Image (cartoon, rainbow, N blue to C red):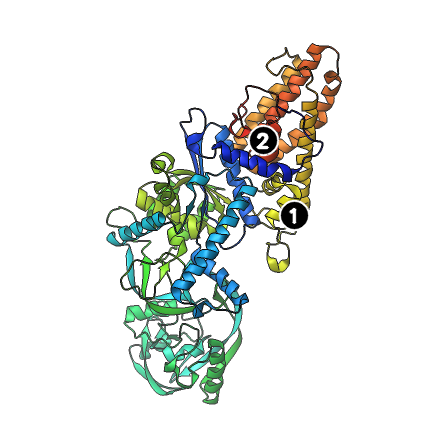
């Protein structure tokens, strides 16, 4: 075998060829790994959304998970990294809407089945692109087990869980108030909202003898009661009475009720109750059996119940309603600087309109199911408290417990075309499941539908690695539904990475022009340089800083590895790889130090401190091996005495081989390419299956 390396390392010429070698070897499949591997190590890939190319955030998760898999594979584990792709429901429909908009089309003009097929074609095309990109990043996942969230066997499991929830009394369907995005025309869960502090006018409006404060005068047509706090002495004489008031559509009668949720310190202490358009008012309405009068349509415009205001948008209606109320002398005063929190759609920023929708499916998060002793939320909390699921970093436990304490029932219905249709005969709208519902089943659904025996061999999985921003969207729900359906935790560790930022610690966005294209960077500097740049300085739970100069710096490190390896391989003339020369005290000390270093790196890898391990290996290779050991050994490599020369050759080759093993999880391409040129006959066929250094 050729041992000489070319003068310059060219990632473009190496990386595709090396990946093809790995893939053809079959070693990504745990069942084909050599040796007796008794312990399994499993990661289920968080399925990227198949609605566009991978971005730098995806590169972070791919790198971290590949490091874990490659490390555990070298530790002799039966490693399974199961790849997958998410249809991503609402998210994909939003992206497809933008595509249609650019083409001058709207999804509302396309028949439902045709729209579904168009989005499917779009998704499957993106899926192919993403698979190529994952390979470019070096992902050593088992492609033979790849899953898609719309695979028929996955959908079957989704339906099984749905039926079990129904049988256990954890599902209910009914008329409920939901978060409605008028732009996207769908309901959203509480988690799919973002909040913004805004300053709006607070209007003090006369209702007969009473005055109340509201920021939403345009919903007054849907008022079905006025409410006060039962302990508020100012209004005792009105409680239970019906008062008469003048309104924009003529005089009307309205009842005054007492409810403890009313804050006597807000405004005048009197509030209008509009059950169809406010979550708190809906709850008050349920307690007091109030009429639910919808006055805003799902397109965000006022309806026929509002008389001359019908057809106006909420913004237009508010302006006209206030003007007309002022003409009638029904506005006592206006506070123009009222500060309050407004809920927005997390995708488009449209103000959420609370709406009452029929036939919405909800999962009860706090009710004890018939087949269990604890509710979904209690099961998850108990499991984390017992340490059966551990968070890395641990501080996220507190956030998890806080969220679980305040958890609400989960609306799993979505009024979109793209997704898994809810199996309900009364589902005339064709509602689909919230994509987070099917995704919450991912760890067990994948292993139950791949190769025979996979679920038994590889579940529970070892690590769920994902971004901290979806801890509650996804991680908490996987824990709850995994425990509920399988009786076991879905994973033992949750490793949470941060959101990628630029060198000024700004979040990356197209509008800021600071987005880094991972594939473009790989073309310039190679995948190994990008991987190292994404890991060094990237502690769990913190936002990693990435910029081109940092990536370029690790390209220089790749060149250093290449040049040092080239030097070692070029200076092996007359060396017998099978021999082990007698070492002196100095050489023994160097190798003992290296063994201590190996233990230190292993400890860091086992405790998920990959950022520190990568940095330490970098410094050892460059500053200890290259700057000191190689420089000190140069005179001995040219010594005419064969024993002295062979001792030096053995030393530098042993250190290089060990360093390549340590570097392999981080920089797999260059280390494998160098390893393939090693002059050792009894070596394993690939560095990726070599034994981790002791």
Q: Nearer the viewer, residue 496 or 508?
A: 508
Mark 1 against mark 2, which lies toward the viewer?
A: 2
Tell me the SS state at disc 1: loop
Which of the numbered marks, if any, corresponds to residue 95?
none
Which of the numbered marks, if any, corresponds to residue 547?
1
Which mark is first along the chain, 2 or 1?
A: 1
For marks 1 and 2, give the CA distance.
26 Å
Q: Quadrant of residue 663?
A: top right
Q: Position of residue 92 (x, y in %)?
A: 47, 58
Tell me the SS state at disc 2: helix
The correct choice, above or below, for 505 with respect to 253 in the image is: above
The correct choice, above or below, for 160 with respect to 458 in the image is: below
Drawn side of residue 262 relative to residue 664, left or right: left
Decide if residue 540 is in sight here.
no
Q: Quadrant of residue 645?
A: top right
Say few, some or many: other residues with alpha carbon within 10 Å of mark 2 (under 14 / 14 to 19 / 20 or more).
many
**In the rendered picture of this protein, how many numbered marks are placed on residues?**
2
Q: Nearer the viewer, residue 368 or 497?
A: 497
Decide if residue 148 is in sight here.
yes
Which of the numbered marks, if any, corresponds to residue 672?
2
Which quarter of the rendered picture does the N terminus lie within?
top right
Say few, some or many: other residues with alpha carbon within 10 Å of mark 1 (under 14 / 14 to 19 / 20 or more).
some
Drawn side of residue 73 relative to residue 558, left or right: left
Drawn side of residue 240 relative to residue 116, left or right: left
Q: Quadrant of residue 574?
A: top right
Q: Position of residue 659 (x, y in %)?
A: 61, 27
């Amino acid at each position: 075998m050729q041992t000489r390396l070319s003068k310059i390392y060219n990632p473009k010429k190496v990386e595709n060829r090396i990946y093809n070698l790995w893939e053809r070897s079959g070693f990504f499949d745990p069942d084909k790994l050599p040796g007796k591997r008794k312990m399994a190590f499993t990661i289920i890939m968080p399925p990227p959304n198949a609605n566009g190319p991978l971005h730098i955030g995806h590169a972070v998760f791919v790198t971290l998970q590949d490091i874990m898999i490659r490390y555990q594979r070298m530790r002799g584990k039966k490693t399974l990294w199961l790849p997958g792709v998410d249809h991503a429901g609402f998210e994909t429909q939003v992206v497809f809407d933008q595509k249609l908009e650019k083409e001058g089309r709207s999804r509302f003009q396309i028949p439902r089945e045709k729209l579904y097929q168009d989005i499917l074609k779009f998704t499957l095309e993106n899926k192919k692109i993403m698979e190529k990109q994952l390979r470019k990043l070096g992902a050593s996942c088992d492609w033979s087990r790849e899953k898609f969230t719309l695979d028929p066997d996955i959908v079957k499991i989704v339906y099984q869980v749905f039926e079990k929830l129904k049988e256990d009394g954890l599902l209910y369907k009914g008329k409920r108030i939901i978060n409605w995005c008028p732009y996207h025309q769908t309901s959203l869960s509480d988690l799919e909202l973002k909040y913004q502090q805004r300053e709006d006018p607070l209007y003090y409006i006369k209702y007969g003898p009473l005055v109340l404060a509201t920021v939403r005068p345009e919903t007054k047509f849907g008022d079905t009661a006025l409410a006060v706090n039962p302990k508020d002495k100012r209004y005792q004489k009105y409680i239970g009475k019906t008062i008469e008031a003048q309104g924009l559509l003529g005089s009307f009668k309205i009842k005054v009720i007492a409810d403890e949720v009313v804050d006597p310190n807000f405004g005048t202490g009197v509030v209008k109750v509009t059950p169809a358009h406010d979550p708190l008012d809906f709850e008050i309405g349920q307690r007091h059996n109030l009429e639910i009068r919808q006055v805003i349509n799902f397109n965000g415009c006022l309806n026929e119940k509002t008389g001359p205001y019908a057809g106006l948008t909420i913004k237009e209606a508010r302006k006209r309603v206030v003007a007309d109320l002022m003409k009638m002398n029904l506005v006592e005063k206006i506070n123009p600087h009222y500060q309050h929190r407004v809920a927005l759609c997390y995708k488009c920023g449209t103000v959420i309109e609370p709406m009452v929708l029929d036939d919405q499916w909800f999962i009860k998060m706090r009710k004890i199911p018939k087949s269990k002793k604890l509710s979904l939320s209690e099961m998850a909390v108990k499991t984390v408290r017992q340490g059966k699921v551990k968070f890395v970093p641990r501080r996220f436990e507190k956030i998890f417990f806080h969220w679980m304490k305040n958890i609400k029932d989960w609306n799993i219905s979505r009024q979109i075309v793209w997704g898994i249709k809810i199996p309900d005969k009364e589902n005339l709208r064709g509602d689909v499941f919230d994509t987070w519902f099917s995704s919450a089943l991912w760890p067990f659904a994948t292993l139950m539908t791949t190769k025979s025996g996979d679920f038994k061999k590889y579940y529970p999985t070892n690590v769920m690695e994902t971004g901290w921003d979806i801890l509650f969207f996804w991680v908490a729900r996987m824990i709850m539904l995994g425990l509920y359906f399988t009786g076991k935790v879905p994973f033992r560790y949750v490793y949470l990475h941060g959101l990628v930022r630029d060198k000024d610690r700004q979040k990356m966005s197209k509008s800021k022009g600071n987005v880094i294209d991972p594939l473009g960077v790989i073309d310039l500097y190679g995948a190994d340089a990008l991987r190292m740049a994404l890991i060094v300085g990237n502690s769990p739970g913190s936002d990693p800083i990435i910029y081109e100069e940092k990536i370029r710096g690790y390209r220089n490190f790749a060149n250093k590895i290449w040049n040092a390896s080239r030097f070692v391989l070029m200076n092996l003339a007359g060396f017998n790889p099978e021999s082990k020369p007698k070492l002196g005290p100095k050489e023994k000390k160097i190798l003992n130090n290296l063994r201590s270093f190996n233990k230190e790196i292993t400890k860091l890898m086992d405790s998920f401190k990959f950022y520190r391990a990568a940095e330490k290996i970098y410094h050892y290779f460059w500053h200890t091996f290259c700057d000191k050991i190689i420089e000190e050994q140069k005179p001995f490599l040219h010594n005419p005495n064969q024993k002295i020369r062979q001792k030096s050759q053995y030393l530098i080759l042993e250190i290089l081989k060990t360093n390549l093993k340590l570097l392999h999880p981080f920089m797999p391409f260059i280390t494998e390419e160098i390893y393939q040129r090693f002059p050792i006959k009894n070596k394993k066929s690939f560095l990726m299956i070599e034994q981790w250094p002791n």
